[in-house]
Image (cartoon, coloured by chain):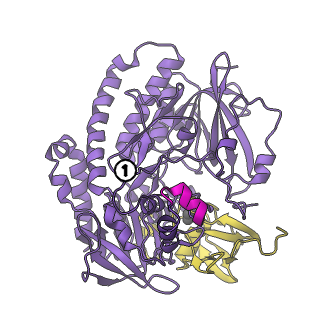
């Protein structure tokens, strides 16, 4: 049975041992899955969503009958190509699978068990396991959120969140939507919102675009990115959207929902300049400060990380997309934020490399296709690094917060409490702040407030000590009754880990979403 | 629905199934098929459907993709469901979730 792609998969997708399990069906995961499958591997592709595409190619349910789904996307044809290859091949697509941990079994040959919950927050929730000889992590990114007064008010939504709700649900958070934060995603979001009928009075960008001009070599190396910027710029001009650089939303107005925002100029370190606040009327604010690689499955398996130019952690990968743990590959945003095209290229490299290893073929690095893909990757990674440096949060952003500003949305912990933990009780890192204040202890387990808490804990003087890479023993919350339904008789060679990790993913007190 | 400069108009939505109704705190909302509960609520201009445990403050969808848990709602009597992930179905009853969502549960 092992090794034959269709055995077991046709009937019970959980009964087979696949050559490769791919986690994430976005650009990187899709490219990796179809490439490996076309080279003869049996492949399972797990994804939380009901439809493939990840965040970038999120699209409406077929019931909507969208005749122009590409109207909300760049480069839809690339996605259509991947989808065709997926449909033509025999990759086993496991939709609606929320992977919460990956285990390694060290037998005669290494095996991986991918644990998932099906139908999380939908119907038919139960735990399942997928076994594979190799794993490709293509789990994408989170949106980085930095708090400011009023950011918990209804009508304030993530910029990527607004984009996701628009692409999949064809809805807008309001009629007049200010877009704010930092990073190139803001331009794409503003363009989509405006072409879908929202008024976008301003795009508020905390960085200065001059940063790009200081790196002409990198810009010249990736002209396609410049062309994209021109397309976004033209779309914004057409819809009368004003771009305000070196500015930030420093206050949201309204009692039960957004009625307006105050936009202030910020200095090079993102410190608000006194007396520069201007009020803009709006009924929604889409905000985000770039993306952060989603790496917890990998770091809990011990994969090495690298520090990115904007101060977060991405997986450290070699030229063939291997992590530091044998048998475990990664591609796309998990290895650093770089966009859809780069993710596709990396997914393909990984697919080729995994296929070569599983089939015992030597030297994928000498494969002509791999050489070409690697050249493209280097160029796009260089551009991505430059972009990360330009939009890295300036260390003065913490001055946006007054003491009453909630930092942790789940546990409603104000900045004042975090500052007290730091100043009065000597907390120097996010974990200590968490123990003292409950910041990061709620449902989302610090995914929303982690960057902010680490910054406040680090104090005024410097950005270091560095926030540690995300380490959560469980990559998603698992209802206790679902854990209880796991068959205890199954062999598990992986050492128990929770004992050395006091903070499990189950928020204490409320035990998270229970069903 | 306006054809032009609306999200549905932009992608040329031609629904394959009839529109249907759900209710939010007793108020009927008609929607296109194929949307999450959060998207249906946004389409009706509703941005908040939960109050927080400590401050009793209103919240709705924030991240839109299942990460933040701000969108928890009581759906057909079951609390703590992420409205951004749950598909809306004809006749669904959505109610504002108060606090920890344990109201009415023996926990
Ligand atoms: S909006 Fe964030 S989890 Fe639903």
Q: Is residue A512 left or right of residue A150?
A: right
Quarter residue B88 falls in: bottom right
Q: Chain of mark 1?
A: A
Q: Can residue A289 be seen in this snapshot?
A: yes
In the picture, the quarter occupied by the C terminus of chain A is bottom right
Q: Where are the magenta residues, as a range?
A: A427-438
Residue drawn at x 69%, y 48% as measured from the top left: A118
Q: Is residue A433 magenta?
A: yes
- Decide: is A477 above or below A285: above
The residue lying toward the viewer, choosing from A39 and A461, is A461
Q: Is mark 1 within 8 Å of ligand 1?
A: no
Query: Which percent across, then down, holds residue A98?
Result: 63, 48
Classified by dominant secondary structure, the portion drawn in magenta counts as helix
Q: Is residue A300 left or right of residue A58?
A: right
The residue beneath circle 1 is: A311
Q: Colour of chain A?
A: purple
In what element is the residue under mark 1? loop
Q: Is residue A159 left or right of residue A425?
A: left
Quarter residue A488 falls in: top right
Q: Quadrant of ligand 1?
A: bottom right
Query: Which percent across, then down, holds residue A172?
Result: 46, 72
The residue lying toward the viewer, choosing from A464 and A285, is A464
């Amino acid at each position: 049975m092992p090794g034959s792609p269709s055995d077991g998969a046709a009937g019970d997708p959980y009964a087979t041992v696949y050559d490769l399990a791919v986690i994430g069906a976005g650009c990187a995961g899709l490219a990796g899955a179809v490439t490996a499958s076309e080279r003869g591997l049996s492949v399972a592709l797990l994804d939380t969503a009901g439809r493939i595409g990840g965040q970038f190619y999120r699209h409406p349910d077929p019931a909507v009958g969208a005749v122009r789904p590409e109207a909300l996307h760049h480069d839809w044809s690339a996605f259509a190509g991947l989808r065709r290859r997926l449909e033509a091949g025999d990759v086993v697509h496991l939709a609606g699978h929320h992977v919460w941990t990956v285990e390694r079994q060290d037998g005669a040959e290494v095996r991986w068990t991918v644990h998932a919950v099906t139908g999380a927050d939908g119907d038919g929730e139960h735990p399942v396991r997928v076994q594979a000889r190799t794993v490709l992590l293509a789990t994408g990114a989170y949106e980085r959120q930095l708090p400011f007064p009023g950011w918990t008010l209804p009508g304030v939504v993530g910029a990527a969140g607004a984009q996701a709700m628009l692409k999949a649900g064809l809805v807008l958070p309001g009629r007049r939507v200010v877009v704010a934060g930092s990073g190139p995603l803001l331009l794409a979001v503003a363009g989509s919102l405006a072409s879908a009928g929202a008024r976008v009075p301003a795009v508020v960008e905390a960085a200065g675009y001059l940063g790009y001009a200081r790196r002409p070599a990198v810009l010249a190396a990736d002209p396609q990115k410049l062309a994209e910027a021109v397309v976004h710029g033209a779309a914004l001009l057409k819809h009368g959207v004003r771009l305000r650089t070196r500015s930030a939303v420093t206050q949201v107005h309204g009692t039960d929902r957004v009625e307006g925002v105050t936009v202030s100029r910020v200095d090079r370190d993102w410190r608000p300049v006194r007396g520069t606040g201007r009020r803009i009327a709006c009924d929604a604010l889409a905000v985000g400060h770039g993306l952060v690689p989603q790496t917890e499955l990998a770091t809990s398996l011990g994969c090495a990380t690298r520090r990115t130019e904007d101060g977060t952690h991405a997986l450290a990968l070699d030229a063939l997309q291997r992590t530091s743990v044998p048998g475990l590959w990664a591609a796309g945003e998990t290895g650093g934020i770089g966009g859809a095209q780069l993710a596709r290229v990396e997914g393909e490299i990984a697919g080729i490399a995994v296929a070569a290893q599983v089939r015992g073929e030597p030297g994928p690095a000498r494969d002509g296709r791999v050489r070409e893909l690697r050249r493209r990757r280097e160029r796009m990674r260089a551009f991505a690094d430059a972009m990360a440096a330009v939009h890295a949060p300036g260390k003065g952003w913490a001055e946006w917060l007054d003491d009453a500003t909630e930092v942790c949305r789940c546990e409603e912990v104000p900045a004042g409490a975090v500052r007290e933990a730091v100043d009065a009780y000597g907390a120097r890192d996010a974990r200590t702040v968490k123990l003292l204040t409950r910041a990061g202890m709620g449902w989302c387990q610090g995914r929303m407030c982690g960057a902010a808490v680490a910054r406040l804990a680090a104090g005024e003087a410097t950005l270091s000590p560095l926030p540690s890479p995300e380490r959560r023993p469980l990559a998603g919350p698992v209802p206790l009754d679902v854990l209880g339904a796991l068959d205890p008789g199954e062999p598990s060679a992986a050492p128990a880990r929770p004992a050395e990790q006091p903070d499990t993913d189950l928020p204490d007190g409320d035990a998270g979403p229970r069903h | 629905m306006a054809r032009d400069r609306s999200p549905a108009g932009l992608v040329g939505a031609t629904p394959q199934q009839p529109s249907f109704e759900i209710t939010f705190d007793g108020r009927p909302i008609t929607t296109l098929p194929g949307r999450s509960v959060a998207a249906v609520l946004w389409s009706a201009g509703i941005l908040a459907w939960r109050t927080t445990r400590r401050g009793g403050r209103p919240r709705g969808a924030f991240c839109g993709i299942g990460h933040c848990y701000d969108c928890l709602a009581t759906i057909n009597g079951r609390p703590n469901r992420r409205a951004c992930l749950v598909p809306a179905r004809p006749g669904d009853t959505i109610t504002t979730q108060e606090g920890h969502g344990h109201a009415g549960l023996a926990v």
